[in-house]
Image (tube, helix red, strand yellow):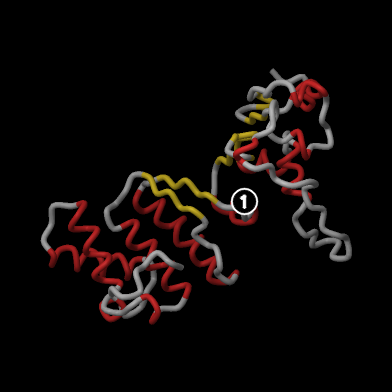
Amino acid sequence: MASFAPAITIGDQMTEQLLLHMNITKKEAVNISVEMLERVGISDASHRFKQYAFELSGGMRQRAMIAMALSTRPKLLIADEPTTALDVTIQAQVIDLMKDLVEDFGMGIIFITHDLGVIAQMVDRVAVMYLGNIVEQGRVRDVIRDPVHPYTHGLLDALPKLDDLDSPLTPVPGDIPSPLERPNGCVFHTRCSLVEPQCSQSAPKMVEFADNHFGACFVEAEKQGAT
């Protein structure tokens, strides 16, 4: 929502970065920018191109931001919480748009988000991180349907259960430690219900629990015989 400077038009910001990164004229930069605004579903793109960010709705700003990011045709797009603060209808439109653009442009996306619903719809592979450490990774269906790390279990258990609306939410217990005072051993052991003495003494390595499904947990690895 804050990707655009409020005192500069959307078009000027889009053309500026094109002129910095590509060897093209200003006219070509304008044409590319307007074309990308149209491509992401913004109607009357040539008019919107001349407007300021505050004149666009939240959904339009998200689309314009995506258009600007994709106008240089990157091989890889890093999208950090691109659907935050959008209502579910606009969120679904943005997700569908990004899926289409991946297919059309043949690019990859690293999608960073806390929204497990978005992850389930959007990605092929997922890496679950805690305190900057990857604690589980694999195909998205495998990780969501059969999680192996206690933190992943906790994230999934914290989701509202649509088939039992009266059941209370189950948050992950405890508080996140300060990054400046990281726990010894497994970074999650201070909040884990499966904790054993070795968890506070050494950090578990990533092991393969199933085909291309990895996790870093002493207890689960021993229980399931993972190597």
Of residues 20 and 109, the one nearer the viewer is 20
Residue at image coords 46%, 55%? 99
Position of residue 64 relative to residue 124, above or below, is below
Residue 157 at what x, y percent from top left? Answer: 78, 49
Vertical placement of residue 201 versus 84, above or below:
above
Name the amino acid type tagged 1: Ala
Which element carries disc 1, helix, strand or loop?
A: helix
Asked whether, in this view, residue 13 is left or right of residue 22, the answer is right
Side of 27 where 207 appears, left or right: right
Q: Which residue lies furthest to the front in this view?
A: 180
The image position of residue 67, as x and y in percent, is 35, 63
**Residue 190 image point, x, y percent:** 77, 36
Q: Position of residue 52 (x, y in %)?
A: 33, 78
* Snapshot quadrant of residue 136: top right
Q: Is residue 130 left or right of residue 4?
A: right
Which residue is painted at 79% across and 25% down in the image? 219
Crowdedness near tag 1: few (<14), some (14–19) or many (≥20) residues, C-alpha within 10 Å: some
Give above or below for 102 relative to 125. below
Q: Residue at x 75, y 56 (%)?
A: 159
